[in-house]
Amino acid sequence: MREIVLDTETTGLDPKSGHRIVEIGCVELVNHVATNETFHQYINPERDMPDEAFRVHGLSAEFLRDQPVFSDIAEAFLTFIGESPLVIHNAEFDMGFLNAELAKIKLGKLDMARSIDTVRMARKKFPGAPANLDALCKRFQIDNSNRELHGALLDARLLADVYLELSGGRQRGLELAGRGSRNAAQKTASNTPLRQPRPHAPSPQEEEAHQAFIETFDAPLWRLENEDAG
């Protein structure tokens, strides 16, 4: 099972107000285990960088000016994610920005149904508790000491670990494996036809053959013991 953990950084909070994506980071998971496959790209937003956004991710307009625009990296991005489910922290935010960028270059939108929102997972599992990425890293004892600023690839890597814990952690695989083994054993036992117990008493013919065989012995030990006892 392939999944893509995804994060973006932007110039602001709303694409409808003209804000754009400035960074995309993706981490590939196969069977809930991170592989070495990633996608990471800085993007020229073709606009200024508000101070509030700069304080979040530290990406300046000067730095981004030399990066490719979204249309130049869209094909590589779409190829990387393929048709896999997208694991996103607050999926509506990132999916909204991605679909706004795709709409600008007249490409089809990403279906929200393919997204897995880890914010919703966290709120369902821990009602009333903080559901931001830092709080979840602290809860699950995931080292996020390098996260002085937001970064799409760094946050995607952290989110991959958080997602694993929200999905049941390392015990999840062990539990499923054990449950599968028990179910398989029960299924095998239930499908095995019942055998009737085998008879263990000798037949008359077997008793006669055995007695004839004993008569061939010269003074067997058990016969002497019986005579001494008498």
Image (cartoon, grey):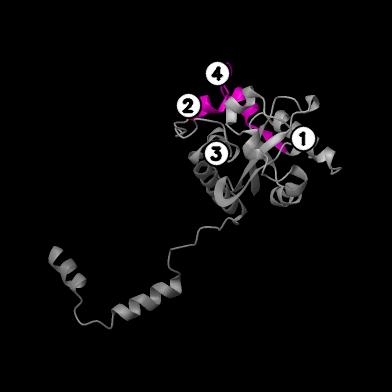
Classify mark 4: helix, strand or loop. loop
Contact, mark 2 vs mark 4 (Cβ under 8 Å): yes
Looking at the rendered structure, the kind of residue marked 2 is: Arg
**Is 179 placed left or right of 213 in the picture?**
right
Looking at the rendered structure, the kind of residue marked 3 is: Leu
What separation in Å lies between label 3 and label 2 (alpha carbons)? Answer: 18 Å
Q: Earlier in the sequence, mark 3 or mark 2?
A: 2
- The residue tagged 1 is 112
The label shown at residue 154 is 3
What separation in Å lies between label 1 and label 2 (alpha carbons)? Answer: 28 Å
In this rendering, the answer to whether 210 lies above or below 39 is: below
Farthest residue in the top direction?
A: 128
For disc 3, the neighbor class at 10 Å (few under 14, some 14 to 19, many from 20) is some
Judge depth for marks 3 and 1 and give the one in front: 3
The label shown at residue 129 is 4
- Quadrant of the rendered image containing residue 213: bottom left
Classify mark 2: helix, strand or loop. helix
- Quadrant of the rendered image containing residue 64: top right
- Magenta stretch contains residue 162: no
Q: Earlier in the sequence, mark 1 or mark 2?
A: 1
Residue at left offset 55%, top offset 58%: 196
Q: Which residues are magenta?
A: 115-138
Q: Is residue 111 visible?
A: no
Q: x, y (%) of residue 131?
A: 58, 23
Q: x, y (%) of residue 215?
A: 28, 80
The label shown at residue 139 is 2
